Amino acid sequence: MSWTVRAKISEVSLLDINSAVGLNTKSMFDKVYGAQQTMFITCDVTSGNQLKDAFKKTTENFLQLDIVCNNAGVGNETNWQRCLDINLVSVIRGTYLGLDCMNKKTGGAGGVIVNVSSMAGIYPVIFGPVYSASKHGVVGFSRAVAGASAAESLGVRINVLCPAFTDTPIMKSISSPEMLGQFTGLDQLAVQAVAALGIIDPSLVAEGFLQLVTDETKNGDVMKVSKQKGIDYEKYSKSLW
């Protein structure tokens, strides 16, 4: 799922390929914010046209875009091209669509984009090479485009959120043949890794997300969220330029 949020008055646009899940989430939001403050759009983020249309509908309905979270992700070493399309290509596309809407140079009001990567985007996971590649790509792309946005004075901050194993549906298939692809022999290693590192509650990830959104000093920052250290930041040297 990826979603966009209009700041201050809690207007939320939810995007998901799974309509049942999306509508249920909207229902929960409606109870807090009211039905007029939220909208749900069925969207396959691997479709450039669907994603572009979702951004268009959101800005038409709420008039302004302030926050974008690119959060769609899968683990699939069998159909690894789809893994890259969802985890990396759609994040790039969503980031650029967000920049188009919020760019101060072209009439936007500025804003912030949070791209969800993973601890696998910092530390390679040997039972998920393509998953690791996709998440490393999210980190590298986000850091680079954050620097470009600052250099161009676009008024849009871009940050990265890297959770460790989190209590989400993806955990149910962490050691499945589809997830592991040609490395099915590493299924027990996957199970042992989860047992060793533990599973974090999504609420901690949400706390980290809000920090990246509200702290205006954060741009190009890479936040790690883990059972052992909670919310922490990866330290990098400055970019080449």
Image: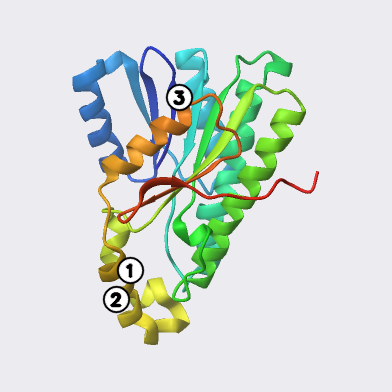
Residue placed under numbered mark 2 in the picture: 192
Find residue 61 and name its label: none
Quarter of the image where one finds residue 177? bottom left
Measure how far apart labels 1 and 2 are at the Cα level: 11 Å
Q: Earlier in the sequence, mark 3 or mark 2?
A: 2
Query: Residue 86, percent across and down?
Result: 51, 53
In the figure, is residue 146 to the left or right of 45? right
Circle 2: element type: helix
Circle 3: element type: helix
Find out whether the residues at labels 3 and 2 contact each other: C-beta distance under 8 Å.
no
Residue placed under numbered mark 1 in the picture: 174
Extreme residue toward the left, this view: 31
Residue placed under numbered mark 3 in the picture: 214
Which amino acid does the dot numbered 2 rest on? Gln
- Mark 1 neighbour density, 10 Å: few (under 14) some (14–19) many (20 or more): many
Query: Residue 144, percent across and down?
Result: 69, 44
